[in-house]
Image (tube, rainbow, N blue to C red):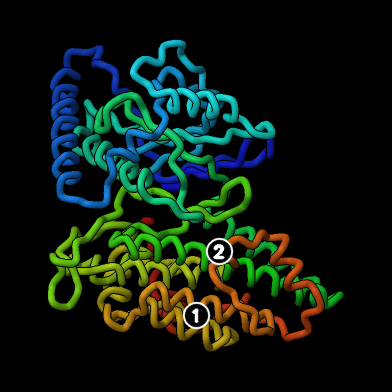
Amino acid sequence: MSWCGTPSSRNAQVVVTKSTSMGSCDPPQMDQDIVGWEEGKAFEVEAHEYLSRMTKETQFFDQEREDALPRFDLKEVVRGTLLGRGGFSAVHEVKSLALEPSEDNMSDDAKDDRRVMSRMCIRNGDARYAMKKVAVDGRREPQRYMKGLLDLAIEMKFLSVMEHPHLIKIRAVSTAEPCTGNYFILLDRLYDTLGQRIVSWKRQSWKALSMKKKLFGGLKINDTLTATRLVAALDIGSALLHMHANSIIYRDLKPENVGFDVRDDVKVFDLGLAKEVHPHEAHKDGTYHLTGMTGSLRYMAPEVAVKKPYNSSADVYSFGILLWQILSMDIPFKGLNVQLHHELVIGKGIRPDLPAKWPQGWKTLVRKCWAGKLADRPPMERVLDDLRSSLSTMHGSSEDFGMDVSARTNKSIEQLFMSGRSNKSIDQSSPHVGGLSSFIAKSTTAIGMQN
């Protein structure tokens, strides 16, 4: 789900992807809607029962942490621009939080938190928070409605416990019960998605190549852009590593689920498909019996696509595809429809072309991540080590690019790579011709693959 829009004050376009019909959860006004409405309410009950069972089976969720979140009634939230829609939910920026005078059954801390959020709702003219709420009509699509309610409630439970610099932060929840139509969560407002940022990086890279022909200044600019992309990949990987360290598989890594906040920090979001696994339930090979065909096919590990057992290495595969996209600034498997993807990528193990000019370390890392065999994929910790090594090599020194590199601002990266570096620039803008690209060029026109 993509919901990172640029604020109106910056005169840019709002991102809306995977559009679905917006539905009301108010009682039906027409007799023919009554049956659908009753089914929707029944699915709310079923979703809540499933959530209760799931909560009892986990040791990760924490009711005290959930209860500590500030709570707002739906009528207190003044919604602004629609930022985006996914398969189940819509996300709006929050224009203001109009507090009601009644705050019964709230602790003093909770009342203070609400007032602080209300005061800080707008920063420098831009909305600071975003509201996510199920946008499926429970009367007409009761089963999808139930899935949306569960997705949102599960995301809330994970985010209320998980804290990491590169995971989106949950700020508050609804006074309504989870798995009901009026339930919502308030999150930090994000801006560009990774997909948008890649387009911007590519445009800057082309401009730098043009400058190189005239002034040779483009050489250093390209170094800075490359470092910026590597740092973004490192930040995303660190969020995945944090989830894996807590026995959680993300299962939905894609550019649309990575955004940038007001400080330009990377934030992974949309944890509705995240899954906690229990080591004692693993098969002998370390895999788990989990739901297949989960996530977006373009970034989905082959074993997930064919509904075989899998583990956190499925996220490593997704990261490998995404890393290729970040480095190449191109769309993986472009031109393949669903049938060709299953035949070539899943069935025959074909992967995107690796540009000949890429450093060998990049090519080796990407190949390992998207390996067909689960056992051949490195753990995220090793992936991050290799990314840090690439950054150190680019810098031309033995500086320790530890996790603190994630905290570097774009300005500090620019200062680092524009200050007296004389090593040769890495030109990775031209893709290598052959392999998958050759096949697509010779094949008949295929419809675009669904995200």
Q: Is residue 289 left or right of residue 64?
A: left
Secondary structure beneath label 1: helix
Task: Kindly identify the residue that appears in the image at 66 percent across and 59 percent down.
Answer: 409
Within 10 Å of disc 2 (Cα), the crowding (few <14, some 14-19, many 20+) is many
**Which residue is located at x 45 percent, y 19 percent?**
76
Is residue 258 at all visible to an observer of this figure?
A: no
Q: Give the camera-side residue of 106 and 429.
A: 106
Secondary structure of the residue carrying numbered label 2: helix
Q: Which residue is mark 2?
A: 232
Nearer to us in this view, 426 or 28: 426
Would you identify the image quadrant in which residue 109 lies?
top left
Examine the image and state in which quarter residue 134 appears: top left
Q: Residue at x 59, y 25 (%)?
A: 119
Q: Confirm whether residue 254 shows in the render.
A: yes
Nearer to us of marks 2 and 1 is 1
Query: Label 1 crowding class (10 Å Cα cut-off): few <14, some 14-19, many 20+?
Result: some
Q: 143 and 61: which one is in front?
A: 61
Residue 286, percent across and down?
Answer: 19, 74
Residue 312 x/y as whole percent? 29, 68
Q: Earlier in the sequence, mark 2 or mark 1?
A: 2
- Looking at numbered disc 2 in the image, what kind of residue is underneath it? Ala
Please give left or right for residue 435 compared with residue 395 in the image.
left
As drawn, 244 above or below 425: above
The residue wearing badge 1 is 386
Q: Amino acid at mark 1?
A: Asp
